[in-house]
Image (cartoon, helix red, strand yellow):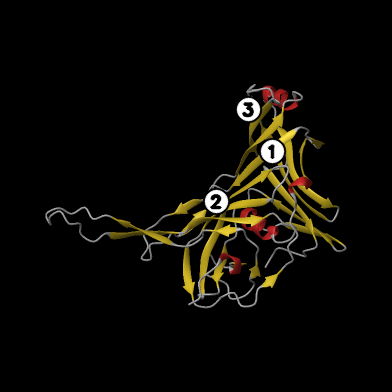
Amino acid sequence: MARARGANAIMTAAFETTYGTPPTTGYRKLPFVSSNLGEEQGLIPDDLLGYGRESLPPTRDVINNDGDVVVPVDLRNFGNWLRLMMGEPVTTAAGAVNTHVFSSGKRDLPSATIEVGLPEVPSYGQNFGVRGNTMRVQMQRSGLLTATLGLIAQGEKKLGSSGSGTPLEASVERFSPFQGSITRDGVALASVVSAEFTYSNNLDKVEVIRGDGRIEDADPGMVTMTGSIVTRFANTILLDQATSGEPVELTFGWVTDAARSLIIKAHAVYLPRAKTPVTGPNGVQATFAFQAAKDMTLGKSVTATLVNNVSAYTG
């Protein structure tokens, strides 16, 4: 009897034309670190009295399919996740180099079908009506660069064989943490120990009465981008910015060369005043939490620019 192992798990995804309807073609194989997508249905304890001390059978509750997927921040495949989170990009080509610009704030966001396969059993969980809710990225000096994606799906079908056919597959070329940089108004920010940011669509689940117990959809709410920057206290640049109350443009990026890069730019970032605690003989660090807002000139709060050799993230 075969036992499922994570080493052989396969994730494929395709964007849906109609919300909640799995496509029959257009699937791509996507690399991932972990996934807990899948339907779950709880039980409600019975509350009836008059039948003695023994409990009566419970009642099944509604079906939920919310989960996190951890994926590598890589050169080619990550663009599919950016599209799920921010909508289709504007793509321009210059020879073999393509620049994909994803912008926040679109009224409508795409949905996808994501299949997680365990071929040994075999068992394939086809999660449909998947929308991107949150994207969290941590920046540090070393380690592996990943993004934790909070997803909300409408439901899941369990299949005995894959429903994704022969998926397309792009080579994996991960960005490395040491390639990362943070800039403030276009100038590199020095003495940064670590940083993290979370982009959120604040999805609102449409929880209506249905015969199947699933949600009707998940509607986009207000876009937010929040995070924090931890710095060695070597100057007062960020402290002065926080004190002034004026917004600043921050970029978080990873650059391999002119033809391979990912830059995530928050156009109007507000910083709160932060303490500079002294906790021992070593260096003094300050943590600045931040919130991004809409730039009134650009009409958006966040732009993600991915430069690679992928022709398009549409279809």
**Callout 2: SS:** loop
* 225 to 149, vertically: above or below: above
- Give the residue drawn at x 62%, y 75%: 25
Closest to the observer, 307 or 45: 45
**Residue of label 3:** 272
- Give the residue drawn at x 69%, y 50%: 145
Amino acid identity at mark 2: Pro
Specify whether 34 is left or right of 281.
left
Q: Is residue 191 visible?
A: yes
Q: CA distance from mark 3 to mark 2?
A: 27 Å
**Residue of label 2:** 220
**Callout 1: SS:** strand
Report crowding for label 2: few under 14, some 14 to 19, many 20 or more residues within 10 A (C-alpha): many
Closest to the observer, 294 or 284: 284
- Give the residue drawn at x 11%, y 54%: 50
Toward which corner of the image does residue 70 lie, by quadrant? bottom right
